[in-house]
Amino acid sequence: MLKYVYIMVLAWLLGGCALFSGSLNAPVPQHLPALAQAHWFQLTDMQNGRQSLLAVQALADAQGTYWRWVQTDAFGVPLARQRIDSRGWRNDGFVPPNRRASQLFAAMLALLGGETTLYPQLTAATQGQDTVYRQHNGRELWRIRALNEGEWQIHTATGDHWQVKIIEE
């Protein structure tokens, strides 16, 4: 009997993961710009000071080109593994959904892509030192501030504040 309970719990957990493996509520770009090489970043969550590493690379499979994002803690444990392709943001592997990471990665895609037209569903405007990305209804999605060469602060509408620094290109 206990064996069946374990099987039911496992099926329930896997079903929950499958339910949330689709879109992670981050904007989907119109196209993916070329990314010639992998990029490594140091991320600092400015709310608690925790640091993590982020690797971004362009890959291709039978469905086409996609970008893979892997965020790990200092010990190499994955915090988020996601991919973006023409179908949107999805988890990549067996890692719980991380909507905070999706918002951060989507903002970073705008930085790495170097285009303000990457997200046609958003408008980008400069306000002082910040580039502010808004939805067409006027709701602010991200605020990105360039600090130094290869270093930015990203503020999301969900209240997350990140410091992003390139450590290797």
Image (spheres, rainbow, N blue to C red):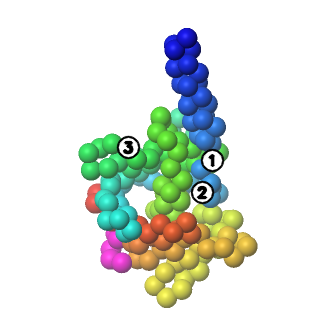
- Residue 72 position in % (x across, y down): 35, 48
Q: Residue furthest right?
A: 137
Q: Which residue is mark 1?
A: 23
Q: Nearer the viewer, residue 162 or 151?
A: 162
Spatial distance from mark 1 to mark 3, Cα to Cα? Answer: 19 Å
The residue lying at 31 percent from left, 65 percent from top is 49
Spatial distance from mark 3 to mark 2, Cα to Cα? Answer: 20 Å
Q: Which residue is mark 2?
A: 26
Q: Which amino acid lies under the numbered mark 3 shown in the image of this protein?
A: Pro
Magenta span contains residue 79: no
Q: Which amino acid lies under the numbered mark 2 shown in the image of this protein?
A: Ala
The residue lying at 48 percent from left, 55 percent from top is 101
- Residue 28 position in % (x across, y down): 62, 55
Q: Which residue is mark 3?
A: 78
* Residue segment shown in magenta: 147-151
Magenta span contains residue 148: yes
Instruction: State if disc 3 and disc 1 touch (CB < 8 Å).
Output: no
Spatial distance from mark 2 to mark 1, Cα to Cα? Answer: 7 Å
| Secondary structure mainly formed by the magenta segment | strand
Tell which circle, 3 or 2, labels the residue nearer the N-terminal end: 2
- Residue 60 position in % (x across, y down): 51, 39
